Image: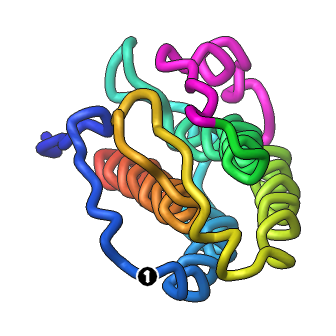
Amino acid sequence: MQPKWTWFDRKFDFSFPPEKIFDILERLRGTPIRASQLVSGLAQDVLTRAESDDTWSVQENIAHLADLEPLWMNRVNDILSGAEVMREADLTNTNTTQAQHNARTIDDVLRDVTEIRESFINLLTPLTIEQFAMASLHPRLNQPMRVVDLCFFAAEHDDYHLARARYLIDLA
C-alpha cells in the first residue's frame, strides 16, 4: 500500500521570489503531456479501477485536474482584483465525484485537461512580475498567497494527483 500523505495535511513554503514563476509555468505547461504519457496504452479497466469505493481511479484523478482549473483561474482573478480573501474551494470535490469521468474516454479527459490548462496559461502569461507578487488570503491555509504561490500550489496539486494515478497503475 502506498503511504499516503494527504493533500489536506500538506503545508507550503512560499518564500521564493516572484521570478520563480517562469519555472512554475513550465511545470504547469507539462502536466497535460505527463498525464498523457502516464496513461498511454493502458486498458480501460486499468484507467477506471479505484483502489477502494471511497477513492478515485486513474482517470478520475486526471480529470480532477481539469475540474479544479476554474478554481485556479478564479483565484488569480480574485487576487488581481484586490480581494482580501480568495474564494473557497469545494473541499468535498463534488464536481469530480459526480462527473462520472469513468464513463468517458481517456482521450476526452486528456483533451479537457489540455484545453483548460491552456486557458490558465493564457491567463497567466501576460501578467507582470508585480502582478505575480500580488496576494490574497488563502481561506483554508489561512496564509497570504501570491499569484506565483497559487501557481506553485496548482503545480503541486497536479503532481499529487499524477503520483496517485501512477500508484494505481502500478497496483494493476
User: The residue under label 1 is which amino acid type?
Assistant: Pro
Quarter the N terminus occupies: top left
Regarding residue 6, the answer to whether it shows in the image is yes
Residue visible at 77% across and 59% down in the picture: 117
Name the dominant secondary structure of the magenta segment: loop
Query: Percent from the top left, x then y, of residue 121?
Result: 79, 69
Front one among 118 and 12: 12
Query: Magenta segment, which residues?
Result: 84-105
Could you say where residue 65 lies in the image, as x and y percent from the top left? 62, 45
Verify whether residue 92 appears in magenta.
yes
Q: Answer with the quarter of the image where residue 78 lies.
A: top right
Q: Is residue 106 visible?
A: no
Q: What colouring style does the render use?
A: rainbow
Question: As rendered, which of 71 and 46 lies closer to the eye?
Answer: 71
In the rendered image, residue 58 lying in the magenta stretch gets the answer no
Q: Is residue 10 left or right of residue 56?
A: left
Q: Provide residue 29's location: percent of width, then percent of height.
A: 68, 75
Q: Residue at x 85, y 46 (%)?
A: 108
Quarter of the image holding residue 100? top right
Q: Residue at x 73, y 19 (%)?
A: 99
Q: Position of residue 59 (x, y in %)?
A: 60, 40
